[in-house]
Image (cartoon, rainbow, N blue to C red):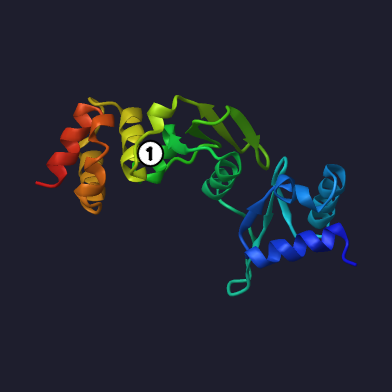
Amino acid sequence: MQSTEDRIITSISKRGRGTIISPLDYAGYGDSKAVQKAFERLAVSQKLIRVARGIYCYPKIDKALGLGVLYPTFEEIAAAIARRDKAKIVPTGIYALNKLGLSTQLPMNVVYLTDGSSRKVRLDGERGIQFKHTAKKNLACQNDFAMLLTFALREIGENNLTAEQLAHVQELIKSVPIETIKKDFALIPAWIRKIIFASYE
């Protein structure tokens, strides 16, 4: 008969490397203390890595370049937390600019807006992911690119966009079919809509 630990790692391995999980995902495998202890033992044995409190990863292993364990990105961790909490998220602030190539800065603390609960997830060292609650209407865009673009340009400000940034943004917009953005126009500020229209001319 398999132990709780063996049953959990067998299940996780079937989901593939790079999978991010929580002990809550395996609540049916025993009482909460037993499941938590199983995860802790799997982390000690390096079958899993603990990326934050209550969040673990079945890591990818780079053998080609000999890099070994590959840690998940901010984005992968945030997406896993959002899936677990059934919440919608969007990067904001400097991270939104970085995602669109409008800034080379990568903040130590990445900020996401969410329709879920506000919280801060501390990763290794000083790094962390902060979720800030916002009304659902602020995350109502159906097109993820349109929503990310809106928050990134709001971060810069209408009168602070440089010619170089504008040219970069227009190239990004051109790679996205206008039909997929049009349905969100009512949610996008007028000055950003003008940039979008001008990009397709």
User: Can you give x and y, in whole percent of width and height, for residue 193 in the image?
Assistant: 19, 34
Q: Residue at the location (67% across, 67% down)?
A: 14
Q: Secondary structure at mark 1?
A: helix
Which residue is depicted at the point 56% across and 45% down?
Answer: 83
Which image quarter is the N terminus in?
A: bottom right
Q: Position of residue 149 (x, y in %)?
A: 32, 39
Q: What residue lies at 72% left-to-right and 54% top-to-bottom? A: 49
Q: Is residue 132 above or below residue 17?
A: above
Residue 68 in view: no
Q: Is residue 126 visible?
A: yes
Q: Which of 36 and 166 lies nearest the eye of the viewer?
A: 36
Question: Residue 97: where, in percent of width, then height?
Answer: 38, 39
- Judge from the rendering whether residue 153 lies leftward or rightward of residue 64; answer left or right: left
Name the amino acid, label 1. Leu
Q: Is residue 4 left or right of residue 99?
A: right
Residue identified by numbered label 1: 97
Report the residue at 48% width, 41% height from top: 106
List the single residue furthest toward the left: 201
* Apparent side of residue 53 relative to residue 111 in the rendered image (left or right): right
Give above or below for 35 relative to 4.
above
Asked whether 129 or 103 is in front, the reply is 129
